[in-house]
């Protein structure tokens, strides 16, 4: 498991519409984790949260408390085209 895998995952879901849509349609955290692992990504929820926070900071954005909770609480997926404006839970 690695932080780099989580960062790569964030980049992939921005460009891979089919993967993004499968994740968005997944009913729970476990299903989203299975989808991400099947796509070749292996990271913990803590690593994912760190990647989201780091990417937002690099983009000059600050996540709201609600967005942080979405990430921490269930592998929230950023909305396509709006990396951190809306997190899909």
Image (cartoon, grey):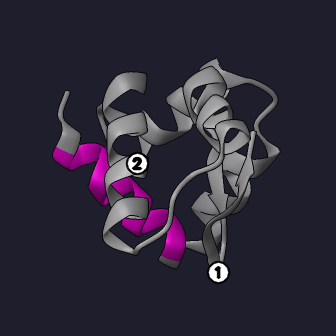
Q: Quadrant of the N terminus?
A: top left
Closest to the camera, between mark 2 and mark 1, is: 2
* Nearest the eye: 62 or 55: 62
Residue 56 visible here: yes
Q: Residue 81: which numbered mark, if any?
A: 1
Q: Is residue 41 left or right of residue 38?
A: left
Q: Is residue 29 left or right of residue 11?
A: right
> In this picture, which residue range is highlighted in magenta?
4-14
For disc 2, the neighbor class at 10 Å (few under 14, some 14 to 19, many from 20) is some
Up-down relation of residue 45 to residue 8 (above or below): above
Q: CA distance from mark 2 to mark 1?
A: 17 Å
Predominant secondary structure, magenta span:
helix
Residue of label 2: 53
For disc 1, the neighbor class at 10 Å (few under 14, some 14 to 19, many from 20) is few
Going from N to C along the chain, the mark reached first, 2 or 1, is: 2
Instruction: Determine whether the residue tagged by mark 2 lies in a helix, strand or loop.
Output: helix
Q: Position of residue 8 (x, y in %)?
A: 29, 58
* Nearest the eye: 57 or 13: 57
Q: Residue at point 41% right, 73% down? A: 60
Q: In which quadrant of the rendered view does residue 49 lie?
A: top left
Q: In which quadrant of the rendered view does residue 82 lie?
A: bottom right
Q: Residue at point 31% right, 32% down? A: 47
């Amino acid at each position: 498991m690695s932080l780099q895998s989580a960062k790569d995952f964030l980049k992939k879901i921005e460009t891979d519409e089919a993967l993004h849509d499968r994740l968005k349609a997944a009913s729970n955290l476990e299903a989203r984790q299975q989808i991400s692992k099947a796509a070749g990504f292996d990271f913990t929820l803590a690593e994912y949260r760190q990647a989201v926070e780091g990417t937002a900071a690099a983009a000059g954005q600050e996540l709201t408390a609600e967005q942080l909770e979405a990430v921490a609480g269930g592998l929230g997926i950023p909305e396509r085209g709006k990396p951190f404006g809306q997190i899909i839970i």
